[in-house]
Image (cartoon, rainbow, N blue to C red):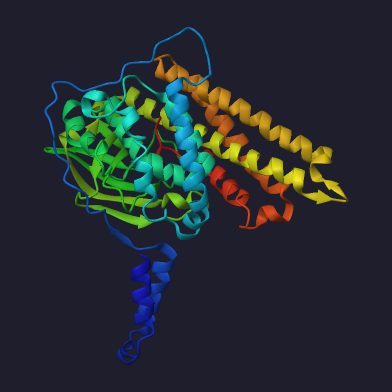
Amino acid sequence: MGLGLSALTRLAGSKVIERAGLRKPVQNLVSAGTRNGFRVAGAAGRTFKSAQKLGKPARLAPAEDTGLFDLTPSEDQQLIVETVTEFAAEQLRPAAADADAKLQAPEGLLSRAAELGITLVGIPEELGGVGTERSVVTNALVAEALAHGDLGLAVAVLAPSAVSTALVSYGDEQQQADYLPAFVGENVPAAALALQERTALFDPFKPATKARRTPKGYQLDGVKSLVPRAADAELFIVSADLEGPAGTSPALFLVESSNSGVTIESEPAMGLRGAATGKLHLEKVALPAGALLGGGKAEVFTEVVRLSRLGWAALAAGTAKAVLDYVVPYVNERKAFGEPVSHRQAVAFSVADIAIELEGLRLVALRAAARAEQGKPYAREVALARKLAADKGMQIGSAGVQLLGGHGFVKEHPVERWYRDLRAIGVMEGAVLL
């Protein structure tokens, strides 16, 4: 898009355009492109094809139920979290401001993130991954660690694993054989779970995107919003309202970027700018019968929404921890009237409130994750985690800005970016999946 705008800008100033009397139309085009972005064809995706034939879908077994609720990470989890935390501190945090300004991750960063093998943890060994059982808690800890570096870049890193996780949990043997081999190779494809739509009071269970049955499969029409890495994505899982004998119901579909009728439009937002969010336009997109994920079952769609919301709660906890870790040394070192500002009760209580709300959010989110991976009911816990993440995450971001005073308003300090990112927690659906 940047190259296109540059070329049009040069064209608008050309004397040839002046003589031809076309300056005004070209200037209007430049203005519209700057304001709205250009719609382009989906990324030139690879050809997904079966690398092996599967007799049945490969699934991860539920985690063992020990009868105890213990937040102590296992030895393997601790090693994974330490590795991801180090990567987030050394790679994501330094790149975050630049990614926020340029609306994209620095070149090579996401490929280095893929080398961590985040997608491999959720893919069974028989399909080339390293997973042996459901690892929702591990996924939550990974999301939290990445978001401590930067929330926008964390979403960009986790977007492909949302698709691979959905394929493992709900894909049939043909879908797994066609798509999952790409997620265990060296060149993991950009992919995205697209549930969000630009609708007031958006309800993920009532998508405006429509799917109708055709003799050869399905046809999709609609627009998805705030899709991470939309311009680069080669594969999408898209929610749509599917017509059926008993009425309509939400369902999930596998859509390749190369499908005719798929176009992408840049959609920069207040936060999550490093995730390079965009609109996914679907215009009479013809899909085969095998594109329906999870058989269109209502319980599959419900679980995807819940696990996505749980992912956003984990991300909120990670960024909220970043705020806490930043403001504590700041208020201890910043002096006013001859003493650190942390000596003021209002400041000390505000910092304490951040710590208290953060611990509550983490406890509820990890409890929901533990129940989910053990196959227990977890709807209530997810609802609580979602509510806490949306409300308290935003409050923590605002408190971080307030505690820095004037410094909280300028880009010299990262708290203003964290505040903008945390505002997304209450509105986002999809994109990540634990």
Please give the name of the residue rendered at 63% of the width and 53% of the height, measured from the top-left corner.
Answer: 413
| 352 horizontally vs 274: left or right | right
198 versus 137 height, above or below: below
Quarter of the image that includes the N terminus: bottom left
Please give the name of the residue rendered at 31% of the width and 32% of the height, measured from the top-left corner.
Answer: 120
How far across and how far down the image is residue 205, in percent?
39, 32
Please give the name of the residue rendered at 22% of the width and 54% of the height, measured from the top-left corner.
Answer: 44
Q: Is residue 312 something that shows in the picture?
A: no
Please give the name of the residue rendered at 35% of the width and 78% of the height, measured from the top-left corner.
Answer: 26
How far across and how far down the image is residue 390, in percent?
56, 36
Q: Nearer the viewer, residue 211 or 30?
A: 30
| 180 horizontally vs 28: left or right | left
| 180 horizontally vs 225: left or right | left
How far across and how far down the image is residue 179, in percent?
21, 36
Quarter of the image that includes the C terminus: top left
5 versus 391 height, above or below: below
